Image (spheres, grey):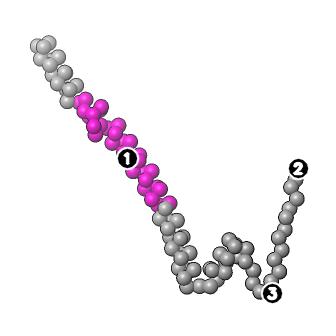
Amino acid sequence: MRFIQITLLSLFVALQSPLWFGNGSLSTVWRLHDQIDAQEIENARLAERNKALIAQVVDLKHGLDGIEERARAELGMVKENETFFHVVESPTH
């Protein structure tokens, strides 16, 4: 009787070991679920960024206001008859 119990227990442990330690174990599945969640968050962030970039492209293609705004902000351009003032603040010690 004791031999059968030990044999069944050994068989049970042998069958359970892939579930806990092998390829496709529970810990691997949990880690993969965490990676999927992180990737979905990253994908959502990138999708929002793409929407903003698409809106900028459409604005630049169809409107001069967007082009003018970018030229002023990024290149420091001014219109004719405008005066550009550059204010430099003194560093505080």
Q: Earlier in the sequence, mark 3 or mark 1?
A: 1
In front of the other: label 2 or label 1? Answer: 2
Which residue in the protein does label 3 denote? Answer: 81
Q: Residues within 10 Å of mark 3 (few under 14, many from 20)?
A: few
* Residue 93: numbered disc: 2
Q: Residues within 10 Å of mark 2 (few under 14, many from 20)?
A: few
Residue 32 inside the magenta-drawn segment: yes
Label 1: state its secondary structure.
Answer: helix
Q: Quadrant of the N terminus?
A: top left
In front: 36, or 93? 93
Q: Amino acid at mark 2?
A: His
Residue 92 percent coordinates (x, y): 87, 53
Which residue in the protein does label 1 denote? Answer: 33
In this picture, residue 67 sits left or right of residue 32: right
Alpha carbon separation for disc pair 2 and 1: 52 Å
In this picture, residue 62 sits left or right of residue 35: right
- Residue 66 picture quarter: bottom right
Residue 2 inside the magenta-drawn segment: no
The residue drawn where x is 25% and y is 29% is 17
Q: Amino acid at mark 3?
A: Asn
Residue 32 percent coordinates (x, y): 36, 45
In the image, the segment drawn in magenta is 16-45
Label 2: state its secondary structure.
Answer: loop
Q: Is residue 87 above or below residue 61?
A: above
Alpha carbon separation for disc pair 3 and 1: 61 Å
Q: Earlier in the sequence, mark 2 or mark 3?
A: 3
Alpha carbon separation for disc pair 2 and 3: 38 Å
In this picture, residue 23 sits left or right of residue 83: left
- Residue 13 picture quarter: top left
Q: Amino acid at mark 1?
A: His
In front: 49, or 87? 87
Q: Earlier in the sequence, mark 2 or mark 1?
A: 1
